[in-house]
Amino acid sequence: MVVDILTLSPGYFASPLQEGLIGRGIRQGAIRVRIFHLRDFTSDRHRTVDDRPYGGGAGMVLKPEPIARALKFLGQALPGPPHVVLLTPRGRPLDQMRVRELSARPRLTLICGRYEGVDERIGAAYCHDQLSIGDYVLSGGEPAALVVLDAVVRLLPQVLGSPESQVEESYEDGLLEYPHYTRPRVFEGQGVPEVLLSGDHERVRRWRRRQALARTWEIRPGLIREESLAPDDLKIIREIQKCGLSDPHRGV
Ligand code: 6GU
């Protein structure tokens, strides 16, 4: 997979691309990441990338021409057209389903907007998608590009250490994950739920499912679509609705 990032802060990416799973993915050749400075695609003496908004108001707007030039250049540089994504707080919310779709693309181009905005005509004419990473405002799309990259890389099958057990991870089945414990058995007065020490795999499985459902119900009820729940899960949800439950030490 080849990911191209268009940015006004190319230095921003220097160390994140060397670290962790992204760094490993790059070293293993599972993914190639290329950083392009938008200023390199300007054509005036001052290398101008932004301008005042039509209609007035505060802030500056990223001019369309440098972005268009960069995208045309990238389109030529490699075979196969890239999937072009504009990162903006006004985009559709990123979720694991979109991450999965993105990770299946052979080529991805991420455009880092600045929060004042990118000229609307870029989104309209050049972008397949506009994505936001959450309901808050960042000063630029660069952190969002790293978020997308991290989430995508960990799904690439060639990346060593990308978990096989991804179905158990938060969001892969639409639920938040159950709580985890490791040694010591007592930490600052807090124990470990007895069921996890029981060695009874079926009880552990049921407890984890119940915890996942309870946590999701409490913290992110919007993630639970009752019509798509299995009968067993629905039964658990009904019980949680009646008695409330996510204390890990109660209930199996
Ligand atoms: Cl993608 N960009 C900016 N500037 N702010 C954001 C965002 C993106 N997603 C959430 N907030």
Image: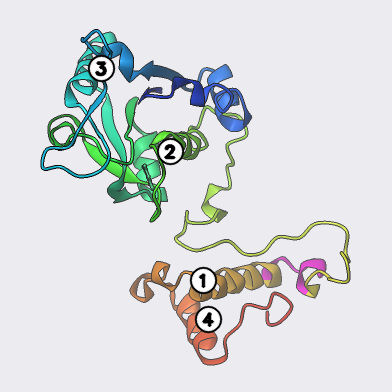
Amino acid carrying mark 1 in the image: Ile
Q: Who's the residue at 47% across and 54% down the image?
A: 172
Q: Is residue 97 magenta?
A: no
Residue 70 disc label:
3
Q: Which residue is mark 4?
A: 236
User: Where does the magenta region start and end?
Assistant: 195-202
Query: Which comes before the other along the chain, label 3 or label 1?
Result: 3
Q: Which tag is nearer the camera, tag 3 or tag 4?
A: 3
Q: Which residue is mark 2?
A: 148
The reply to whether the C-beta atoms of the residues labelled 3 and 1 are less than 8 Å apart is no
Q: Position of residue 141 (x, y in %)?
A: 38, 37
Is residue 25 in sight in this rendering? yes
26 horizontally vs 8: left or right: right
Amino acid carrying mark 2 in the image: Val
Q: Secondary structure at mark 1?
A: helix
Q: CA distance from mark 4 to mark 2?
A: 34 Å
Q: Which residue is mark 1?
A: 219
